Image (cartoon, helix red, strand yellow):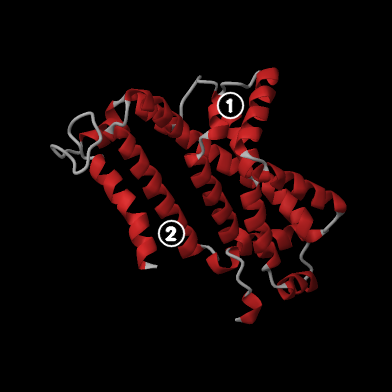
């Protein structure tokens, strides 16, 4: 475990150090250490600030849309278990199992025919469809975790299905819904392949801008972008571990507690 921690930590240390370079080359140890590259990424350089803004729009939009699409499917599957709900759940999970390059090429052709190619909303929809399986799984886990005795008690007291959903089902599944939202947020923020095809060079997210900047070699600003990815991932997954039901999300059998 210690060796694994060292192997994971060393590249992060190098990247963090490289981001402090005062020049335009990425060297380690850094030469003329400065925080100017952070200012370029977050404030001064329009190319990077626009890319960061696009990444946030796509990530938050995709996470919100994915949760909104996954909730009715997960609820229908949990409440009825009908063949229709099973088919919808399978279709919702299928894009996540398809190789990203295949999915990206297919979406590129689709948006090209429908007029959405190069539009940022098409990127939001593409990521939402690609990653919808994550909130679908987390919400389904949350629904299965609900104690049926609570539902029986609500029914005994005369609660309608809508009231039961609002007062029993929804509050108990909030952590799982938020967890699914965060999972999509992080993966969308870091995703490159699908966005490469659907953006059609009309706009750039941070991952695409890193790729475009590679033509001029490795620069310290790219290291700042990498640090941003790391920080966002650590914060989001820490939040899931703190407020979500992480053992159950990881597949632990809670019945043995």
Q: Considering the image in quadrants, where does the C terminus appear? A: bottom right
Q: Please say if 81 is above or below 133.
A: below
Answer above or below: position of 176 versus 118: below
- Where 60 sits versus 238, above or below? above
Residue in view at x 83 percent, y 58 percent: 80
Q: Residues within 10 Å of mark 1 (few under 14, many from 20)?
A: many
Q: Would residue 86 appear left or right of 244 to someone viewing this image?
A: right
- For the N terminus, the image quarter is bottom left
Per the model, the C-alpha gap separating discs 2 and 1 is 31 Å
Q: Which quadrant of the figure has residue 50?
A: top left
SS at circle 2:
helix
* Residue 156 at x, y percent in the picture: 79, 73
> Where residue 27 appears, x then y in whole percent?
22, 38
Q: Which mark is residue 198?
A: 1
Q: Residues within 10 Å of mark 2 (few under 14, many from 20)?
A: few
Identify the residue under disc 2: 238
Identify the residue at the far left of this view.
32
Question: Which numbered disc, 2 or 1, marks the residue that appears first in the sequence?
Answer: 1
On screen, 204 above or below 230?
A: above
**Label 1: element kind:** helix
Image coordinates of residue 67 in percent, x first then y, are 62, 47
Taking the image as shown, residue 24 lies to the left or right of residue 112, namely left
> Looking at this view, is 110 or 27 the one in front?
27
Location of residue 252 by image quarter: bottom right
Mark 2 or 1: the one toward you: 1
Q: Residue furthest bottom?
A: 257
**Which residue sits furthest right?**
83
Q: Which mark is residue 86?
A: none
Taking the spot 48% from the left edge, 40% from the top edge, the residue there is 189
Q: Nearer the viewer, residue 143 or 16?
A: 16
Query: Which residue occupies 29% across, 31% down?
Result: 219
């Amino acid at each position: 475990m210690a060796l694994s921690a060292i192997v994971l930590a060393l590249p992060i240390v190098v990247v963090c150090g490289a981001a402090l370079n005062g020049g335009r080359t990425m060297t380690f140890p850094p030469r003329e250490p400065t925080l100017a590259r952070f200012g370029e990424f977050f404030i001064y350089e329009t190319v990077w600030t626009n890319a960061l803004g696009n990444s946030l729009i796509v990530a938050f939009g995709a996470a919100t849309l994915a949760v909104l699409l996954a909730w009715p499917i997960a609820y229908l599957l949990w409440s009825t278990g009908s063949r229709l709900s099973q088919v919808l759940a399978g279709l919702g999970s299928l894009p996540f199992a398809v190789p990203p390059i295949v999915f990206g090429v297919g979406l590129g052709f689709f948006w090209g025919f429908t007029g959405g190619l190069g539009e940022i909303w098409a990127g939001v929809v593409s990521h939402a469809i690609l990653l919808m399986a994550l909130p679908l799984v987390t919400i389904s886990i949350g629904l299965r975790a609900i104690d049926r005795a609570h539902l029986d008690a609500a029914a005994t007291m005369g609660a309608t299905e809508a009231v039961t959903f609002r007062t029993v089902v929804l509050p108990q599944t909030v952590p799982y819904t938020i967890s699914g939202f965060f999972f999509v947020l992080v993966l969308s923020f870091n995703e490159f392949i699908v966005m490469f095809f659907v953006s059609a060079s009309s706009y750039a997210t941070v991952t695409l801008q890193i790729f475009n900047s590679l033509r001029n070699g490795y620069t310290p600003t790219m290291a700042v972008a990498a640090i941003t990815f790391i920080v966002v991932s650590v914060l989001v997954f820490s939040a899931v571990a703190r407020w979500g039901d992480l053992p159950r999300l990881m597949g632990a059998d809670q019945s043995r507690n």
